[in-house]
Image (spheres, rainbow, N blue to C red):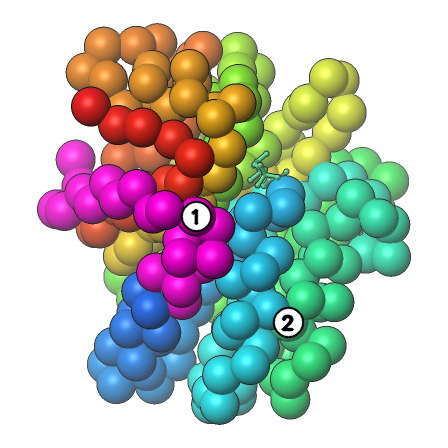
Amino acid sequence: MPTQTVVKVLPDLPQLIDEALTICLAKMQGAIATRGIFTIALAGGSTPKPLYEAIARQPLEWEKIHVFWGDERYVPADHPDSNEGMARKAWLDQVAMPASNIHAMPTLANNPAIDADTYNQAIEKFFASEYYSIPQFDLILLGMGDDGHTASLFPHTPALQVEDRLVTVGEKDGQPRLTFTKNLINQAHCVMFLVAGASKQPALDQVLSNQGDNATYPSRLIQPAGELYWLLTGLEVD
Ligand code: 6PG
């Protein structure tokens, strides 16, 4: 269970993004002070894009920030659906971050399982240092779909059961995706959901309730040992 769960409803998306930026910068400052670097895993979809644009406008120590992705559609980075492509346009191409600090999910082996294993190994290698006992991100950003999925952990898919690795193959409507496993997400120091829009209310009600089926609403699986933030707008909580 999280050490601390914060559920906050913001009046509109700009104020949600402002809140998310404040939290993100605070985690960044703390991590850099403690370990000299900040590790973040990005969410895809549309909600986080203004956050990435806001981060890009900050005067930050880009060489101390390492960017990963929590999930990726199985397409090249220049494909319109690419989460990497979205984040590069919104943020990474706008700042002087060393290319070696940008750890994109590989999608070019024409075999999602091979690419998932490659990324798994890259994460294990990155975190194999004296600062970490396990692969533990400072911050993992997540969205939630209308169906209650998060990252590419979709309802009633095999990825939900994977516990022997950090990265696996997800699937949406039969299309492959790469995704962090629930265990890697739950190992993070801090996990922050950014969720906007009334269409997500039924799923949110199930995810935040004491009951509810994890396989049907996979966001319920996200119970990090660290902090958990739910930043919401256009939604209601009891
Ligand atoms: C993806 C995301 C996915 C996303 C949700 C919410 O690759 O699509 O990682 O999990 O966060 O589908 O997407 P929106 O922010 O567009 O509602």
Figure quarter occupied by ligand 1: top right
Question: Looking at the image, which residue sits at the far front?
Answer: 11
Indicate whether residue 11 is drawn in magenta. Answer: yes
Precedes in sequence: disc 1 or disc 2: 1
Say which of 233 and 110 sits in front: 233
Task: Residue at 77%, 25% (x, y): give it.
Answer: 175
**In-front residue for pair 205/35:** 205
Q: Position of residue 69 (x, y in %)?
A: 58, 54
Q: Is residue 86 visible?
A: yes
Q: Nearer the viewer, residue 135 or 226?
A: 226
Say if 36 sits above or below 73 in the image.
below
* Label placed on residue 28: none
Please tell me whether residue 213 is drawn above or below residue 190 in the rendered image.
above
Report x, y in % for residue 128: 40, 67
- Residue occupying the point 12% across, 46% down: 3
* Distance between the alpha carbons at the discs numbered 1 and 2: 22 Å
Pinpoint residue 13: horizontal percent, then vertical percent: 48, 50
Q: Is residue 75 left or right of residue 114?
A: right
Q: Which residue is at a point 73% across and 17% down the rendered structure image?
A: 173
In this rendering, does residue 183 appear at all? Answer: no
- Residue under numbered circle 1: 12
Amino acid at the residue labelled 2 = Trp
